[in-house]
Image: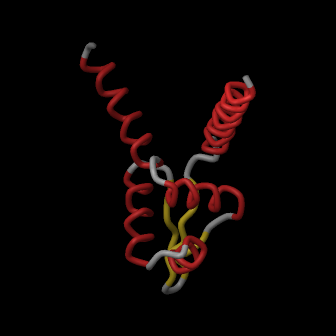
């Protein structure tokens, strides 16, 4: 693999690693469907402490998946690329196909 190709796949892997956690998937889904949220709101929805959710948000931000805006004393997080919903749709299709295949195997 040449260096340019390696770099492209490294960047893809960084994004894949950033979303590879249930809480981060939830955060992205919530921000996509319902708009910007602050860390406290997200922590309450997830059921985790603010420091844990802040770490998840930091990982998503470094990967370029979310961005921030400051309003007064609050920092709001929002999805940077709305195309993430297409990724979620694809993941849901794979989950559905896996369940269907498992059901077919069990029915035999």
Q: Pick out the residue farthest to the bottom.
A: 73
Q: Position of residue 66 (x, y in %)?
A: 50, 56
Left or right position of 83 against 50: right
At 41% from the left edge and 33% from the top edge, which residue is drawn? Answer: 12
Q: Does 67 sit above or below residue 18?
A: below
Foreground residue among 44 and 9: 44
Q: Does 60 sit above or below residue 11?
A: below
Q: Pick out the residue farthest to the front.
A: 108
Foreground residue among 50 and 107: 107
Quadrant of residue 85 within the rendered picture: top right
At 52% from the left edge and 69% from the top edge, which residue is drawn? Answer: 69
Q: Position of residue 95 (x, y in %)?
A: 65, 37
Q: Does 6 sit above or below residue 43?
A: above
Quadrant containing the N terminus in the rendered view: top left
Q: Pick out the residue farthest to the left.
A: 3
At 51% from the left edge and 60% from the top edge, which residue is drawn? Answer: 23
Quadrant of residue 31 within the rendered picture: bottom right
Foreground residue among 78 and 56: 56
Left or right position of 94 against 13: right
């Amino acid at each position: 693999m040449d260096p340019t190709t390696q770099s492209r796949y490294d960047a893809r892997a960084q994004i894949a690693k950033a979303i590879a956690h249930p809480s981060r998937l939830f955060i992205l889904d919530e921000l996509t469907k319902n708009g910007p949220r602050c860390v406290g709101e997200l922590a309450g929805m997830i059921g985790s402490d603010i420091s844990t959710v802040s770490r998840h948000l930091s990982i998503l931000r470094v990967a370029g998946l979310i961005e921030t805006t400051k309003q007064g004393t609050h920092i709001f997080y929002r999805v940077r690329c709305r195309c993430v919903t297409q990724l979620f749709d694809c993941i849901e299709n794979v989950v559905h196909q896996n369940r269907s295949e498992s059901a077919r195997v069990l029915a035999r």
